[in-house]
Amino acid sequence: MVLKNFEDRLERIVEGVFSRSFKSGLQPVEIGRRLIREMDASRTVDVSGRALAPNRFVIRMSEEDYERFLDVQRSLIAELAATVRGYAAQENLSFLGRVSVELESDPSLRVGLFRLHPSYDERLPEVEPDGWLEGPDGTRHQLKNGVMTIGRISTADIVLNDQNVSRRHAELHPVGDTYQLVDLGSTNGCKVNGQRIERQVLVDGDEITLGPVKLRFRRL
């Protein structure tokens, strides 16, 4: 599910003017698949019994592929980091520090080839998430660094006055420098970018649908 969500979002990144750049050479989805394989291969357990995954990933590729990725590098890195966080949440894996994905050019590599170097780096401090949910009318619901409840009940952190929204519809949980949307067993469910979900790590620009209410997730 995590990889499928990554592939779906990736289509939106490279569509239109960028699509021609991704018809040959290294494909971004190959990197996403390798990230998940490396997380499985490199996972370990700390002295307290906590399952850990690498939190820093350096991706080296040919100079030509690196140049092709420049126009969408920021979005691609955000999607790859979200894939790492999402898979970690799915597998109950923890990190020693903030998740970091870096792209580097390597003149020794041919087009289409890449090397992935995962590592545990506690020197990368956690960053407090900073974001908001934006309504269709431009209303902003600022998010805080803690679990937030969304629903119809007046005591929810984000109140949505719609009868098709459950009293306690969903929660937002901080995950690294972003958030995870968690459905609380709502009647009409939660969707992210049109796909029904139970829980999902969010990236900037994701459309959240709670019953009939649509919100846009934004983060700095």
Image: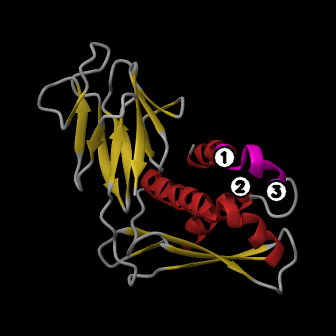
Locate residue 25: give its quadrant: bottom right
Rendered position, 218 above or below 190: below
- Inter-mark Cα distance, 3 to 2: 14 Å
**Which residue is found at the position 71% from the left and 49% from the top?**
14
**How busy is the neighbourhood of tag 3: few (under 14 within 10 Å), some, or many (20 plus)?**
some
User: Helix, strand, or loop for circle 2?
Assistant: helix
Quadrant that contains the N terminus: top right
Q: Which residue is mark 2?
A: 29
- 15 drawn magenta: yes
Q: Residue at x 47, y 50 (%)?
A: 204
* Amino acid at the residue labelled 2: Val
Which element type, helix, strand or loop, lies under badge 3?
helix
Please tell me in which quadrant of the rendered image residue 151 appears: top left
Looking at the picture, which amino acid does disc 1 mark?
Glu
When the figure is inspected, residue 215 is found, relative to residue 189, above or below; the finding is below
Mark 2 crowd level (few <14, some 14–19, many ≥20, 10 Å Cα) = some
Q: What residue is rendered at 57% in x and 56% in y?
A: 79
153 with respect to 185 (left or right): left
Q: Which mark is residue 21?
A: 3
Distance from disc 2 to disc 1, alpha carbons, whole Å, reads: 6 Å
Q: Which mark is residue 7?
A: 1
Secondary structure character of the magenta stretch overall: helix
Residue 195 is situated, as x and y percent measured from the top left of the image, at 54, 31
Quadrant showing the C terminus: bottom left
Q: Are marks 3 and 2 in contact (CB under 8 Å)?
A: no
Q: Nearer the viewer, residue 73 or 98?
A: 73
